[in-house]
Image (spheres, helix red, strand yellow):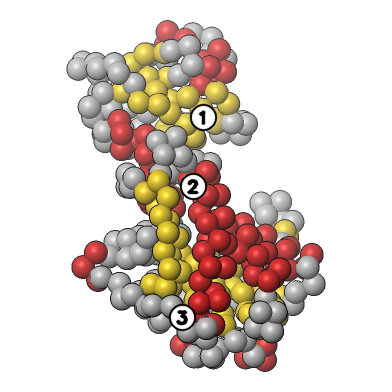
Amino acid sequence: MKDVRIVFMGTPEFSVPSLKILNENFNVVLVVCQPDKPSNRGIVRFNPVKQYAIDNNIKVFQPTKIKEDYSLIKEANPDIIITCAYGQIIPDEILKLPKYGCVNIHASLLPKLRGGAPIHRAIIDGYDKSGITIMNMISKMDAGDILLQESIPILDNDNVGTLHDKLSELGSKLIMKALPEIINNNITCIKQNEEEVTYAWNITKEDEHLNFNKTSKEIYNHIRGLNPFPGSYAILNGKRIKIYSSIIGSSVDYNSICGQIIKLYENGIGVKTQNGEIIITELQLEGKKKMSAKEFINGVVNKELLVGRIFN
């Protein structure tokens, strides 16, 4: 099917496996991604999708506002447009262009977790499974008909990084399964049940701040749902500490308040929660590299003064 003209729209690393497999099996005539952004040091680095496109001689288009600038997409004359974590709302004018329509690769089991952060939210909200949905695009966010869907379990030791990688590969597998059926008009569209809709809003700075008044399981899910990116944090002794990994402890201290350090372990810092204890095992001090809790504890001169201090 090398004669099928595809415009691919995506930006982050998550999108690359899908772009790669489409480029190897079809004719990707244009890649559309978000504009380049400078790093903290002012150095402009290409996003992963752009870098793949350049490495494989695919034309790249980076409109600041796609609803105002999409002439190159029209000129590309696509048979189908495929989006995967692109990062902007696609206007109706583009949705109407290709004869096979516009298809999105979404990292949740729709209608659950519509929106921009479905991988993070699935873990934070305690879901036991996630998956990929291949769907028709309409003007309403992630509300189009489902074309294909496959689930995978969320394991207790998964974090947003491991689940991201699993779903990224699954997305590439599913789009290759769906695309021939779409082109041959041999696929059944399934309407989404609006009564089952939930949303996965983008992660905010407020979401990164840990609340130790929650249960140990809720805090554990929150920490791994933000590990390794963007990372959760709490304040200790007036300083922000990023917290990346934890385990659920078994200690119960009825005399302490939530957020209080109740015990130091060889490999962790036990902190009081609503119903017990969370043990922090990996963290990062301001201006320092990520470290194990053991390294952090070993670096404290008066370790006994840590117990009783409060994360807030």
Q: In this view of the protein, which residue sits in the foreground, 302 or 283? A: 283
Structural crowding at the residue carrying mark 3, measured as other residues with C-alpha within 10 Å and reported as few (<14), some (14–19) or many (≥20): few
Q: Mark 2 belongs to which amino acid?
A: Leu
Residue ID for mark 3: 186
Q: Which mark is residue 163?
A: 2
- What SS does tag 2 mark? helix
Structural crowding at the residue carrying mark 1, measured as other residues with C-alpha within 10 Å and reported as few (<14), some (14–19) or many (≥20): many
**Where 35 sits versus 214, above or below?**
below
Instruction: State the quadrant of the N terminus.
Output: bottom right
Task: Verify CB contact (< 8 Å) between mark 3 and mark 2.
Answer: no
Inter-mark Cα distance, 2 to 1: 21 Å
Residue ID for mark 1: 283
**Residue in view at x 26 percent, y 33 percent:** 215
Q: Mark 1 belongs to which amino acid?
A: Leu
Q: Quadrant of residue 292?
A: top right
**Residue in view at x 51 percent, y 21 percent:** 293
Structural crowding at the residue carrying mark 2, measured as other residues with C-alpha within 10 Å and reported as few (<14), some (14–19) or many (≥20): many
Q: Mark 3 belongs to which amino acid?
A: Asn
- Percent from the top left, x then y, of residue 13? 62, 57
